[in-house]
Amino acid sequence: MKEYEFLKIDLAEQVCTLTISAPKSLNALNSNLLKEMDDFLSNLYPDIRVLIITGDGEKSFVAGADISEMQPLNAEEGERFGAAGASVFRKIETLPIPVIAAVNGFALGGGCELALACDIRLAASTAKFGQPEVGLGIIPGFSGTYRLAKIAGMGVAKELIFSARAIKADEALRVGLVNAVYEPEELMKEAIRLAHRIVKNAPIAVRYAKECINEEYDLPADEAIAYESRMFGKCFATKDQKTGMTAFLTKQDAHFTNE
Ligand code: CO8
């Protein structure tokens, strides 16, 4: 398995855990770390069915983009840095497998935006979410203005972004920013348990479902419904559809082969 300076990778039973590790800065995202993430996501091992993203240590998921690296940037460099992070996060969002964020602590700025780019967010009860950018003289630059409004609604997004107020996990759950909250020691166990539930299902169907939900969201209703019908039809061209339905009808467990 490839070695990285800022990423730790663990692969077991088709579930890959990517741990972001920059301990000196509470796992802040610097440009070398983003390059490593881009490389990892662009060369994902073919047998991975679910990716879990978490942060190293007990205190922080990701405490944002690296402020010391951003401080001297001019407008052009700032745009380039923002675009580099946004492109990595878009890769996560469009990855052909589900991505679970296991938010184990601070998820601030780019850290909150990273969690938002994942498909599902699970949080430790000690996690804290926020978009503190306006307090630093910038706006969220890794697609936070777009995704926070999409996921938690425009009112919540505007309040959190304008005020730079950080919220605890229970409030994040209440506003729909996270799917579930667990005690810190349970978080990874629950993330892996959820990943294994996903792994049991037909991989192509899971992939098509993710694609449908992503693509249909911004389409007018008739186009969205037609999109789903096309993808639904494509499922019947897979061996796994026959496997799944035959297993149901013969009262056996389905063993999908991703075909
Ligand atoms: N960047 C760089 N260093 C950081 C960051 C960061 N985002 N966060 C923490 N660190 C460093 C601290 O400077 C400190 O370093 P040192 O030990 O050398 O002094 C170390 O990590 C430990 O941090 P603290 O001592 O501050 O730890 P505390 O427990 O007291 O506080 C906090 C923890 C509350 C998380 C605090 O560190 C903090 O507020 N961090 C900054 C959070 C933040 O504002 N994040 C948003 C950054 S902006 C952003 O993410 C924009 C994304 C889009 C970019 C678009 C590009 C143009």
Image (cartoon, rainbow, N blue to C red):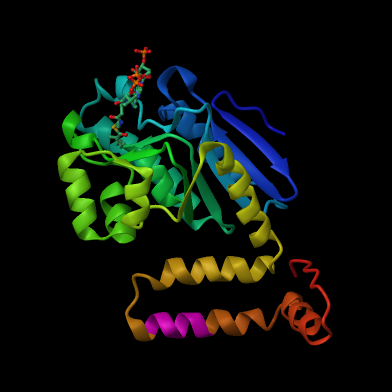
Check the image and name the residue furthest to the front: 183
Q: Is residue 191 above or below residue 3?
A: below
Which secondary structure type mostly characterizes the magenta part of the structure?
A: helix
Q: Is residue 148 above or below residue 109?
A: below
Image point (31%, 37%), residue name = 109
Check the image and name the residue furthest to the top: 24
Image location of residue 96, percent across then percent down: 58, 59
| Ligand 1 placement by image quarter | top left
Image quarter of residue 49 = bottom right
Image point (18%, 51%), residue name = 158
Image quarter of residue 205 = bottom right
Can residue 236 be found in the magenta stretch? no
Image location of residue 110, percent across then percent down: 35, 38
> Total number of numbered labels?
0
Q: Quadrant of the C terminus?
A: bottom right
Q: Quadrant of the N terminus?
A: top right
Image point (56%, 57%), residue name = 98
Q: Which stretch appears magenta?
A: 223-229
Image point (32%, 38%), residue name = 82
| Whether residue 34 is visible | yes
Q: Nearer the viewer, residue 77 or 13?
A: 13
Q: Is residue 240 left or right of residue 230?
A: right
Image location of residue 211, percent across then percent down: 51, 67
Q: Is residue 92 left or right of residue 113?
A: right
Image location of residue 125, percent across then percent down: 44, 41
Q: Is residue 5 left or right of residue 46?
A: left
Image quarter of residue 114 = top left
| Whether residue 84 is visible | no
Q: Nearer the viewer, residue 215 or 136?
A: 136
